[in-house]
Amino acid sequence: MSTDEPEEPAMTSLTGTTTHRHQPDQLDQPGHPGHPGHPASFESDAPAFWRAPFAAAGFREVGFVLSGLPVAVAGFAFAVTCFAAGAGLLVTALGLPVLALLLAGGRGFGALERSRARTLLATEVTAPAPVRPSRPGFWGGVTARLADGAGWRAVLYQVLMFPWAVMSFVVSVTFLVTGWVIALYPLYHWVFARYTPWPGMQLFDYSEHGVHHRYFVTSPFQIAAVSAIGLVLVFLTPQLVRGLTNVNRLAIRGLLGAR
């Protein structure tokens, strides 16, 4: 005689509650909107407006912009130099290896950008598949490199994002420094009267129709107003920097990721 026994649950804890078998979390999938690298997660990953100037994520994004300028200069110089040399040598066989070097170097700079995006922007981008020559030998590797679409996209990234990196650096540093310098003016306004011939911070100095116009920030109301303007810039700067780095996120995903 057979007896039917009820199936045991997947796992039962000592308290009597049932723990179901682990299912892969969809948030861990790169294509899911909750994944840090997904464009829809840009705003959800952003710190609150009032905490943004002091949040670690904001400092990392500023670090991305500041460190991006030397990387962009090196990548742009490498891309332009190798492309010009390779194109000029195409009349000989030496041009093809130089262009292959250009694409290999472009992939290297692309890997650096993906690493910076992962560390500083919380944006994970899957690397493209490695180059696999279809035939052995030196020229087999060269021709495989020349047919590497990911390498050409990486070179395009270095060229297109160079002016963006310069502009992002200048704008971010200008707003960051200006905001904090003006916001902290109440702490050092006394320096002008003690160590300079000015009674306070000078906003403008010009002559018109024989009249010399000079304006200094000296009264408590003026000092407070200037500091308030600085605080506005301090809190707006992280939003500006995040908007700039969102362009980098999209460019990295579009040009440096796997297809």
Image: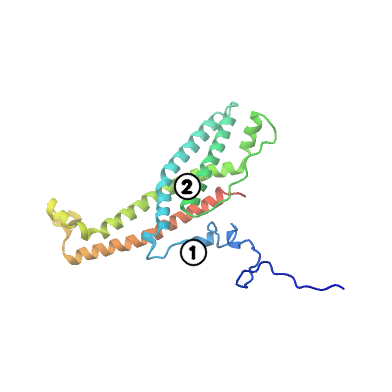
Left or right of 21: which side holds 106? Answer: left
The CA span between labels 2 and 1 is: 25 Å
Question: Depth check: 186 or 161 in front?
Answer: 186
Residue sitting at x 24%, y 65%: 225
Farthest-out residue, right: 1
Within-10-Å neighbours for mark 1: few <14, some 14–19, many 20+: few
- Residue located beneath label 1 in the image: 44
Give the x, y percent position of residue 229.
28, 63
Residue 102, compared with residue 169, is above or below; it is above
Quadrant placement of the N terminus:
bottom right
Give the x, y percent position of residue 237.
37, 58
Residue sitting at x 16%, y 54%: 191
* Secondary structure category for the residue under label 1: helix
- Residue located beneath label 2 in the image: 161
Give the x, y percent position of residue 32.
59, 61
Residue 105, compared with residue 157, is above or below; it is above
Within-10-Å neighbours for mark 2: few <14, some 14–19, many 20+: many
- Can residue 196 be seen here? The reply is no
Residue sitting at x 40%, y 60%: 239
* Secondary structure category for the residue under label 2: helix
